[in-house]
Image (tube, helix red, strand yellow):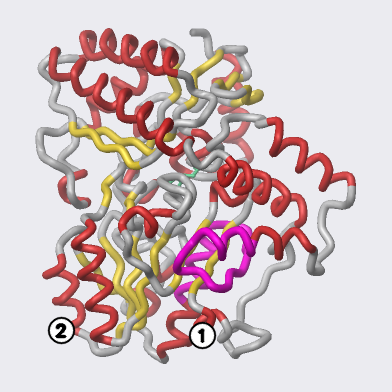
Amino acid sequence: MPTIASQEAFEAAKMVIPGGVDSPVRAFKSVGTTPLFIQKGEGAYLVDVDGNRYVDYVQSWGPLIFGHADETIEKSVIEAVKKGLSFGAPTLAETALATEIVTLLDAVEKVRFVSSGTEAVMSAIRLARGYTGRDDIIKFKGCYHGHSDSLLVQAGSGAATFGHPSSPGVPADLTKHTLLATYNDIASVEACFAQSSNIAAIIIEPIAGNMGLVPADKEFLVALRSLCDKHGALLIFDEVMSGFRADLRGAQGLVGTVPDLVTLGKVIGGGMPVGAFGGKKAIMDMLSPDGAVYQAGTLSGNPVAMAAGLASVQKLKQNGQIYAVLQARATRLMEGFKAAATQHGIALQIDVRGSMFGFFFTDKKVRNFDDALTSDTALFAKFHTGMLAKGFYFACSQFETGFISTAITDSMIEDTIAAAQSVFATIKGA
Ligand code: HOZ
């Protein structure tokens, strides 16, 4: 497929934007090619500036569970836009979306909206520290919780993609309170508690999506809950990616472990920039203006973003059965990939949670970041390039997750498997 217009657009962007992109992963650097510049989205498809169409398995990195330009969400946004873009004052839509979230998520009695997942997590950490009066936090290698200073330590997503899991510019003084543990390994968490009696919180993606898709074991999450209770620390589930993606009740609903705080984003914004953090009333009431923990934002609870989020969450609530349908499609896709890879002698690990899917080019079962790093990233890059050439748009990094939207049909899934079959044949041993 000709991508000349995209290549020219990228050259022009690089002149004025660092790396030509506003978020590193999307530069396609780790797959050794250059990004497609997108003209528009239509249901299951992305259309690039050269006019090529691709079945989209990225879905804006998660938010678009109903696909591109969903009519219901679009209509709500247009209605909201007509009434004004921002007021910096409370609106009814904020209470309506908050009520939906409080009703759906067991852990959430109160919730506050912000503008991104990074902001949500940064605020939740401050709140946990303020509530417990402690400074240290435990995070897991390979989990990504946005790019705030104390969390950019051994991080996944773009940080993993480019091999700099910790960033220059982050003072050691700010990361010395971040203790690192190994995903799905409770002994490593116990070691952190043995090392510090000053732990405010454990933060975890209960379904990790930023080192590729690596779900936590149910027993592991139960054990984290017990350790937090034993040591008076808070348990924070970062569900920016999994919230309303894996299940209507979030990963917490799937696994049955209730955290103290939850961070959200992506789907609750329906494609608009929205984040949120919520949890038990006693903790949330410590936030300013009721409490002393300060957090604020001019565009927080923006009316247009709230309208998109509300439309998205209400549509999900009305169509609760879609999670089973999306999971069945994701499972078929992954099983199809696995069978095709095996046929060509390529080792592939696969996993699915709701509408989230992931695959690793390794013969090792992937349960943590070190396992994920055994993946053959060069083979992944060839696979990515091959699939793109056939009109299938996957995340341009081994350390990201794939998403199915309701716009992706069974026959598109079969076409994707057929394409993968022929790409595997080309890249094996290459
Ligand atoms: N960190 C995001 C996905 N896990 C990437 C966001 C983007 O590049 O848009």
Mark earlier in primary sequence (2, 1): 2
Q: Position of residue 203 (x, y in %)?
A: 35, 68
Vertical order, 301 against 73 (above or below): below
Residue at 61% from the left image edge and 29% from the top image edge:
68
Residue at 29% from the left image edge and 59% from the top image edge:
154
Q: Position of residue 301 (x, y in %)?
A: 70, 62
- Name the disc covering residue 282, or none: 1
Residue at 53% from the left image edge and 37% from the top image edge:
65
Magenta-span inclusion, residue 99? yes
Vertical order, 396 against 336 (above or below): below
- Name the disc covering residue 12, or none: none
Asked whether residue 172 appears in the rendered view, the answer is no
Proximity of marks 2 and 1: CB atoms separated by less than 8 Å: no
Q: Secondary structure at mark 1?
A: helix
Quickly name the residue at label 2.
Answer: 194
Q: Residues within 10 Å of mark 2 (few under 14, many from 20)?
A: few
Q: Residue type at mark 1?
A: Ala
Asked whether residue 81 appears in the rendered view, the answer is yes
* Region in magenta: 98-125
Q: Residue type at mark 2?
A: Ala
